[in-house]
Image: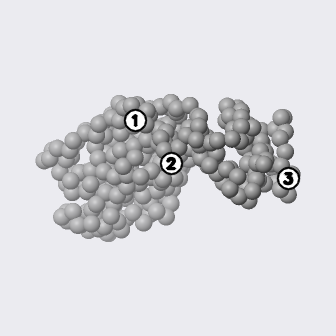
């Protein structure tokens, strides 16, 4: 029997729709996945078989073929575990006929059937909304991250067994609530402030100009002169992020896997203060470390502490 389940795959920072086509029939026992899967996706076969078995489901010897369409797009990541497992269970009629045309499944399976967190949930959910998908089924640990996308019905589950019971209408799972833009109001570290700095008026003025113009800034001076102290306070004079900017920043953190479970949206502007030993060469285009200078025609500001 053939079944089709939808999921979202990542290409860079953007998501793309993938059909998981599962064909389960008689023949020599076998489990193949085609459609340009990478090693992580190929290895999902063992995770899926163990997760199904440990969810109290007997998967008798069958010939299983999974096609990930479109077949000419490379598939990466462990997020295919859940849609493949659901496709198999629909194909063997363990999950009864359900309407999942406007639903996508995303999640990694552990051997005991637990649905684990995956990276890139936010851009996947954003793409699902663009495609007109109504419902996304995701790991419980990704719930906060997905809840910043308005207009989706988000079902966050902890295990394959729980999800099967939900799809068979034996239990209900509360829908995730949308996180409003109110959380953007708490995006500044109130423990530090630019007004804490006494003196160094020229440096503060230069930092204000560099910040306003979006320029890079190189601080040079002896240890203890106040370089790090001033740099850490630059975010306190930056404007608040808009909701769209916060989404863009969170997408990058999501793909990199840097979002904590309790965080839904990155509300503080990303700010880095690398040491000059790793930043000087990249900022000026290579070569030796130049003599500190202030060049009005350059985007690099060099500020000397005296």
Q: Position of residue 223 (x, y in %)?
A: 71, 58
Q: Position of residue 25 (x, y in %)?
A: 28, 59
Which secondary structure, mark 3?
loop
**Marks 1 and 2 close (CB-CB < 8 Å):** no
The Cα–Cα distance between marks 1 and 2, rounded to whole angstroms, is 18 Å
Q: Position of residue 42 (x, y in %)?
A: 44, 63
Q: Nearer the viewer, residue 152 or 41?
A: 152
- Residue lying at the far front of the rendered structure: 198
Q: Residue at x 29, y 47 (%)?
A: 156
Which secondary structure, mark 2?
helix
Q: Nearer the viewer, residue 143 or 224?
A: 224
Q: Earlier in the sequence, mark 3 or mark 2?
A: 2
Q: Residue at x 68, y 56 (%)?
A: 224
Q: Classify 86 as above or below 14.
A: below
Q: Nearer the viewer, residue 162 or 256?
A: 256
Residue beneath label 3, please?
290
Q: Nearer the viewer, mark 3 or mark 2?
A: 3
- Residue lying at the far left of the rendered structure: 170
Q: Earlier in the sequence, mark 3 or mark 1?
A: 1
Q: Nearer the viewer, residue 292 or 133?
A: 292
The Cα–Cα distance between marks 3 and 1, rounded to whole angstroms, is 43 Å
Residue 3 appears in the rendering: no
Which secondary structure, mark 1?
helix
The quarter of the picture where residue 217 lies is: top right
Residue beneath label 2, please?
253
Residue beneath label 1, please?
183
Q: Classify 299 as above or below 23.
A: above
Residue 218 appears in the rendering: yes
Q: Earlier in the sequence, mark 1 or mark 2?
A: 1
């Amino acid at each position: 029997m053939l079944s089709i389940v939808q999921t979202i795959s990542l290409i860079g920072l953007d998501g793309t729709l993938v059909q998981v086509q599962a064909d389960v029939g008689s023949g020599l026992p076998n489990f193949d996945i085609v459609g340009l899967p990478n090693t992580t996706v190929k290895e999902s076969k063992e995770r899926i078989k163990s997760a199904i078995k440990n969810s109290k489901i007997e998967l008798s010897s069958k010939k299983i073929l999974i096609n990930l369409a479109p077949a000419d797009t490379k598939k990466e990541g462990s997020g295919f575990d859940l849609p493949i497992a659901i496709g198999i269970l629909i194909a063997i009629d363990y999950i009864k006929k359900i309407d999942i045309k406007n639903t996508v499944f995303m999640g990694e399976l552990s051997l005991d059937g637990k649905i684990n967190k995956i990276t890139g949930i936010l851009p996947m959910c954003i793409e699902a909304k663009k495609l007109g998908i109504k419902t996304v089924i995701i790991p419980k640990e990704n719930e906060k991250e997905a809840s910043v996308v308005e207009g989706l019905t988000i079902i966050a589950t902890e295990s394959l067994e729980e999800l099967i019971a939900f799809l068979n209408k034996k239990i209900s799972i509360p829908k995730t609530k949308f996180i409003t833009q109110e959380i953007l109001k708490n995006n500044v570290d109130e423990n530090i402030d630019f007004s804490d700095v006494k003196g160094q008026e020229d440096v503060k003025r230069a930092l204000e100009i560099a910040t306003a113009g979006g320029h890079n800034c190189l601080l040079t001076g002896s240890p203890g002169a106040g370089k790090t102290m001033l740099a850490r306070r630059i975010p306190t004079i930056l404007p608040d992020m808009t909701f769209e900017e916060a989404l863009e920043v969170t997408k990058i953190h999501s793909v990199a896997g840097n979002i904590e479970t309790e965080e839904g949206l990155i509300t503080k502007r990303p700010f880095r203060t690398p040491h000059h030993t790793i930043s000087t060469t990249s900022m000026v285009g290579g070569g030796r470390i130049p003599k500190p200078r202030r060049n009005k025609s350059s985007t690099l500001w060099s500020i000397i502490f005296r």
